[in-house]
Amino acid sequence: MVTVKDRVRFVETDMMGVVHHANYLRWFEMGRVEYMRQAGVYLLDLMAAGIVFPITDVSCNYRASARFDDCLLIETAMAELSKVKMVFTYRVVREADGVLLATGRTQNAFTDGAGKIVRLPAEYYDRLQQMFTREEPR
């Protein structure tokens, strides 16, 4: 699992003083990018190789509200990996009291620039697979 620490910015809140729901998807992306970085897979390298990985499915379950200036922990784990897709799970936790704010899941497919499904080359797949196999199930 990879953990990213972030703080809620004022611009991320709504008129009710809580974080707007769409920001959780941004935090999921932060976690996913950091997970891949720690595996040694860099987005710019994939894009230079003509590989993109659009989200094909996303879900978020909101449990409690985050507010301005809360310090958050975005926990990201790989749930499934193949040469054509990857699935991540997420937990967003308020650091101060450990309250679980949201859980989520995303699925990405590997495609070329035209959107055609492609198989992830071994140089990237192997790095992700190594990190995935080191994770403890949760």
Image (cartoon, rainbow, N blue to C red):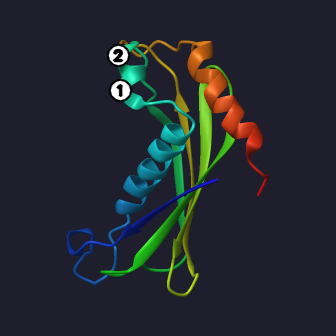
Q: Quadrant of residue 48?
A: top left
Graded by Cα atoms within 10 Å as few (under 14), some (14 to 19) or many (20 or more), the crowding at tag 1 reads: few
Residue type indicated by callout 2: Ala
Residue at x 57%, y 36% (from the top left corner): 39
Q: Which residue is mark 1?
A: 44
Task: In this rendered view, identify the residue nearer to me: 93 or 45.
Answer: 45
Q: Which residue is mark 2?
A: 48
Q: Residue furthest bottom?
A: 97
Graded by Cα atoms within 10 Å as few (under 14), some (14 to 19) or many (20 or more), the crowding at tag 2 reads: few
- Give the answer, above or below, for where 57 lies relative to 62: above
Residue at x 60%, y 27% (from the top left corner): 85
- Give the answer, above or below, for where 57 lies relative to 100: above
Say how many tags the image has: 2
Q: Residue 114, position in %: x, y?
A: 36, 12
Task: In this rendered view, identify the residue nearer to me: 5 or 68.
Answer: 5
Residue at x 47%, y 18% (from the top left corner): 111
Q: Residue 75, position in %: x, y?
A: 57, 60
Q: CA distance from mark 2 to mark 1?
A: 6 Å
Residue type indicated by callout 1: Leu
Residue 73 falls left or right of residue 10: right
Q: Residue 87, position in %: x, y?
A: 62, 39
Residue 115 falls left or right of residue 125: left
**SS at mark 2 in the image:** helix
For the C terminus, give its image quadrant.
Answer: bottom right
**SS at mark 1 in the image:** helix
Task: In this rendered view, identify the residue nearer to me: 14 or 3.
Answer: 3
Q: Residue 107, position in %: x, y?
A: 56, 38
